[in-house]
Image (tube, grey):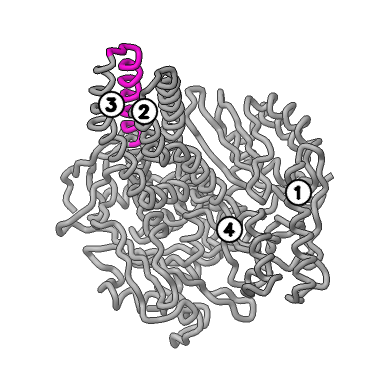
Amino acid sequence: MKKVADRVAAEEKTYRKGTQRARERSIMYTITKNFQTMLAGLALFGIMFGGSSSVLAHTPGADVAKTGVQNEHNSILHDAVPTSSGSDPVVRFVYLIPSDKESRKDYSLAIEAAAKHLQIWYRNQMGNGKTFELQGPVVEARSTSHTAAWYSTHNSGSDYKYWFWDNVLADGFELTGGKFDDSGSRWIYYIDADPGCGNNVEQVGGAGTHGVAELPANDLRGLMGEGNKSPCVGNTPDNAPPCRWVGGLGHELGHSFELPHPPGCDPGSSGPCTDPNSLLWTGYAIYPNTYLRQEDKDTLNQSPFFSAMDLTTELSDCDQIGDEVRWIILLDKLKTDIFDIQQKLTALAAKELQELEVLIRKLLDNRLLQLVQNLKTQILNVVQTLGNLVQAANLQSAKAQITLLSNSTATLSNALNALKQQVSKLKKQTELQQWMKKLDEQLQPLWSLPANLQTKINEIAIGKQLPTAISGDVNGDGLVNEADLTKLDAAIAGMSSLSADEFSRADVAKTCGDQSAKELKKDRQAIAKFIEQTKKIGKRAKPVKDQCHGVLIGQPLSSPKASSSDVQKFSLQAGIALSAGLRETSLQVEIFGLNGTKVCDLSGDSNDLSAQFAHISRALANGIYLARVTVRAADGSILRTEVQKIGIVR
């Protein structure tokens, strides 16, 4: 199909310029005089953005309203978005798992979240209640018979550039019955495999046309906030936040509905590019703050794939998709333990404390009886809070419930201590003393639960932002800490050996490339020194140099270092993230070291932030950091969140 190849080829040129070009153009529309004051205060920042991409775009019901539930909570994964089980035209999402890859539940959930987010976004854009219908269940996971590498190395019989595209669709069609121009379905294939690169020519890794779209592993990583990989050595990966990858899917989806690029935008077109910030050009990079052109809406209004649906109009924060997915998976793992504690506490309040009350009534001690009844009340409060926790709709509400659990557990502890003190005043009450010991044993699993849950949630929030390959991060968990030293100690003692990837991250001190115990000890000393220095960040600690990779320990191995020429770039890129043409907003900038430690948390208006940063920056060492920038409206609602990698240079 020559027209398919032609469309895919044109789309590749579009997407390759995407993220940076769209953001830079949008800046010209959005920076305000008030925000320029803040930019002056952030002049020490330098920022590095990726220029390559892994997704390209594509091309290619009844008018009865489908009812959805409008939820009060703001979590796209929990919203009851209508899906089809009948014969209406639907969009079908397929997650392909190569034979040498494990099925990842987080990838499947992230695809579903992106699909539902776009279903609402398209509805809001249409303005008449119409949007596309999703297949139920939303995501089909299918295992293939080929390895991940096969898709980029098997000669499909066409130009090398299209091998990956051809091979993925061949397997996808065979496994699902999908096809081009399917009147009943639009087929969107995600695959956990990467396109190849030969002679500096990158294979088409994500594209689509005539009712079909294909998206590679980088899009899955992007939705989860994981570091991307560039197929061609030397190209900087696109590590933009998840919203950009939802936008990329929306762009591809639009082409599957026969939506073209705006006039004048395709390479070789005459005249200026109209609507450059629309979704069907490079507006995907600033999603959801992009739009559909009127011509696009007119086309969709006639499409059999669009029909009226009663959905919520509220969009969740798509940059939080990875966090929300991690919370759901974590909760699944914890539910059994939480339910077990809940059950034991309920039995304690309903039965065993009743027995204790009977015993105390015989003593005719009203003070003691009142303390037991208070203890029962506090136990039931904890039970209720645990129940609310497992029903938490999103990460934000989960954090709130954990705070309540911590408070109610502390109150329960106080009630227990008050009862103990009263019992200790009694003489010859051996039976009551035994009851106190029994209560201690039964409540023991509860005391550490809030702190453990808080730790796990903190790991979720930090893990989203960290690149996958960090100098000094021996075990690959995204942090440089004592766990890495333990891993090195085992290798030094000969109890275990380091894999190639582990050693690559561990190899930070001369002589480089030597995995002997002697040289590993030098690596350990350098990493231990870095850990010690990061704990002294408030005392202007000096970063520890990685002698083997030419970067700082704790810095992504694939990232270029900041230079003085990068300093002004943060001002431009921050413009779109922070101002976005909005007024009466409050701003928050959280800065993290690459070991996951939050360095500072600034909030206020632009003038406040300028002054705060001028003070804080004096304590920060030169190096690479992560900044999470949040814009809030006057009512406190989040308008936009951006996570960027920044460099501080002097």
Residue 20 got which mark? none
Would residue 494 be visible to someone looking at this image? Answer: yes
The image shows residue 56 at horizontal and vertical percentages of 48, 64
Residue at numbered disc 2: 430
Q: Residue at 45% across / 69% down in the picture?
A: 192
Given the image, on which type of amino acid does mark 1 rest?
Glu
The CA distance from mark 1 to mark 2 is 51 Å
Q: Which of the pair 245/462 is nearer the observer?
A: 462
Q: Earlier in the sequence, mark 2 or mark 4?
A: 2
Q: Earlier in the sequence, mark 1 or mark 2?
A: 2
Main SS of the magenta segment? helix
Q: Which of the pair 555/530 is nearer the observer?
A: 530
Given the image, on which type of amino acid does mark 2 rest?
Thr
Which numbered mark, 3 or 1, is in the foreground of this view?
Answer: 3
The image shows residue 519 at horizontal and vertical percentages of 79, 71
| Mark 4, secondary structure of its residue | loop
What are the residue bounds of the magenta stretch?
364-386
Which numbered mark, 4 or 3, is in the foreground of this view?
Answer: 3
The CA distance from mark 4 to mark 3 is 48 Å
Q: Residue at 44% across / 27% down in the picture?
A: 413
Residues at badges 4 and 1 in contact (C-beta under 8 Å)? no
Residue at numbered disc 4: 477
| Mark 3, secondary structure of its residue | helix
| Residue 376: in magenta span | yes
Residue at numbered disc 3: 356
Residues at badges 2 and 4 in contact (C-beta under 8 Å)? no
Q: Which of the pair 356/157 is nearer the observer?
A: 356
Q: Earlier in the sequence, mark 3 or mark 1?
A: 3
Which numbered mark, 2 or 4, is in the foreground of this view?
Answer: 2
Which numbered mark, 2 or 3, is in the foreground of this view?
Answer: 2
Q: Earlier in the sequence, mark 4 or mark 1?
A: 4
